[in-house]
Image (cartoon, helix red, strand yellow):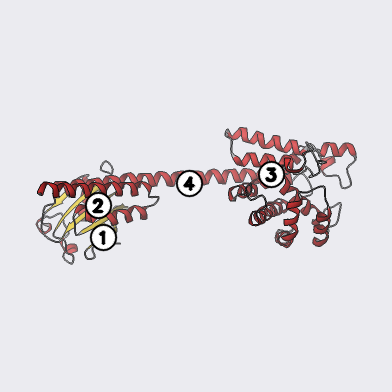
């Protein structure tokens, strides 16, 4: 009977340690790690109290605890004056049956507490970054099994802390990569804008128009299978590159204040292919394929196509034109109409919307219907990012 009871206890401990290890492996922050230890450690070790101590600039920070009455949570003590500090500095497990018989214990700090016996295990023995302490209200010497359990918890916490550090480093690296990518996008888009009479606000406006129209379509169930949140984010981030092909158009054509003749227009039409090629070259320089580049290439290459097939560069028709190009066609045309340029006055908002709604061959009719419903949003975006603002 006694053997059976011991086996049940051992199995309960094993299951608890397995669950603790699993939850620690999924932790993504220090608070989560401490919460797992706080939830599991005391019953597994059979202690009256558990503390989670962090090494913090020469001090022991009692960061968390689970105990029958308060211990030292939130307090900091010098490493040299604290048993957790001794454990970390010496990289050893400490077992003290009678704390008042051991000179390493700061007795005055313990007198207000219930603690009579303790065990302290360093977290990451080779280079301790903390310690986990177990405390008992009655004098006792913890069993070898209890100490193994406490050591297992400390080892699992050490792995979790390392994983959290690596995860944070990966997140930081990813954020830096995103910032670098966005800086490159802005630089490339700015290069295009310096070539003609448009302003940087044209880039911002078209970026916001595209997102507003895409989100409105998704809400209404229009192309919702294509316009997922991830796709809308890609559209928003890649939209500034829609006219990057302008960098390859000669100034005499790009800056001409009047209407282009047929030959000049043929040259202007090459900006779509030039834009796609410029983004493809940037993609090769990055050395990796990313959805961002795919969307950016589509956007630059197809936003001058027409629903009726009369656009350029490939004369695509209807839904053969990618959704990115169909969205940008509306955004780019609206902004061109309502913005003043050296060669034309700005068209009033209502007149621009009516003109685009009446144009049956240029735009996707389903997108135009949504555009007319949210036209006020376009007007507000244009006002917010007004030229000269």
The residue identified by callout 1 is: 66
- Disc 4 to disc 2, C-alpha distance: 29 Å
**Mark 4 against mark 1, which lies toward the viewer?**
1
- Disc 3 to disc 2, C-alpha distance: 54 Å
Mark 1 or 3, nearer chain start:
1
The residue at the point 61 percent across, 45 percent down is 183
Residue 41 as seen in the image, left or right of residue 336:
left
The residue identified by callout 2 is: 132
Q: Residue 166's spot in the image, x, y percent? A: 41, 43
Element on which disc 4 rests: helix
Residue 212's quadrant in the figure? bottom right
Element on which disc 1 rests: strand
Element on which disc 3 rests: helix
Mark 3 or 4, nearer chain start:
4
- Disc 1 to disc 2, C-alpha distance: 11 Å
Circles 1 and 2 in contact, beta carbons < 8 Å: no
Q: Residue 14's spot in the image, x, y percent? A: 23, 46
The residue identified by callout 3 is: 241
**Mark 1 against mark 2, which lies toward the viewer?**
1
Mark 4 or 1, nearer chain start:
1
């Amino acid at each position: 009977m006694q053997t059976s009871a011991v086996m049940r206890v051992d199995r309960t401990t094993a299951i608890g340690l397995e669950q603790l290890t699993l939850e620690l492996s999924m932790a993504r922050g220090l608070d989560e790690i401490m919460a797992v230890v706080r939830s599991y450690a005391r019953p597994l070790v059979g202690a009256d109290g558990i503390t989670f101590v962090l090494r913090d600039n020469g001090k022991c920070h009692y960061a968390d605890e689970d105990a029958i009455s308060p211990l030292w949570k939130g307090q900091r003590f010098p490493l040299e004056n604290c048993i957790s500090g001794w454990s970390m500095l010496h990289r050893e497990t400490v077992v003290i049956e009678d704390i008042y018989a051991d000179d390493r214990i700061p007795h005055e700090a313990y007198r207000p507490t219930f603690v009579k016996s303790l065990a302290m295990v360093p977290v990451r023995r080779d280079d301790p970054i903390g310690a986990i302490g177990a405390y008992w209200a009655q004098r006792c010497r913890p069993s070898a099994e209890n100490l193994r359990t406490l050591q297992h918890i400390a080892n699992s916490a050490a792995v979790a802390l390392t994983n959290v550090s690596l995860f944070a480093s990966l997140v930081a690296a990813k954020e830096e990569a995103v910032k670098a990518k966005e800086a490159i996008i802005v630089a490339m888009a700015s290069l295009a804008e310096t070539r003609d009479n448009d302003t940087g606000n044209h880039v911002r406006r078209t970026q916001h128009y595209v997102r507003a129209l895409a989100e409105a379509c998704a809400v209404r169930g229009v192309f919702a299978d294509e316009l997922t949140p991830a796709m809308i984010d890609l559209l928003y981030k890649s939209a500034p590159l829609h006219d990057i092909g302008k960098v390859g158009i000669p100034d005499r054509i790009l800056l001409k204040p009047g209407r282009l003749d047929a030959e000049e227009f043929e040259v202007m039409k090459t900006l779509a292919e030039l834009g796609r090629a410029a983004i493809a070259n940037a993609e090769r320089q990055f050395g990796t394929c990313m959805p961002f580049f795919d969307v950016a290439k589509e956007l630059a290459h197809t936003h001058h196509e027409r629903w009726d097939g009369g656009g350029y560069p490939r004369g695509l028709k209807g839904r053969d034109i990618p959704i990115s190009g169909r969205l940008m066609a509306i955004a780019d045309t609206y902004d061109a109409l309502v913005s003043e340029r050296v060669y034309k006055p700005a068209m009033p908002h209502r007149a621009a919307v009516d003109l685009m709604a009446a144009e049956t061959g240029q735009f996707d009719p389903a997108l135009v219907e949504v555009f007319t419903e949210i036209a006020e949003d376009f007007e507000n975006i244009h006002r917010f990012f007004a030229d000269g603002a």
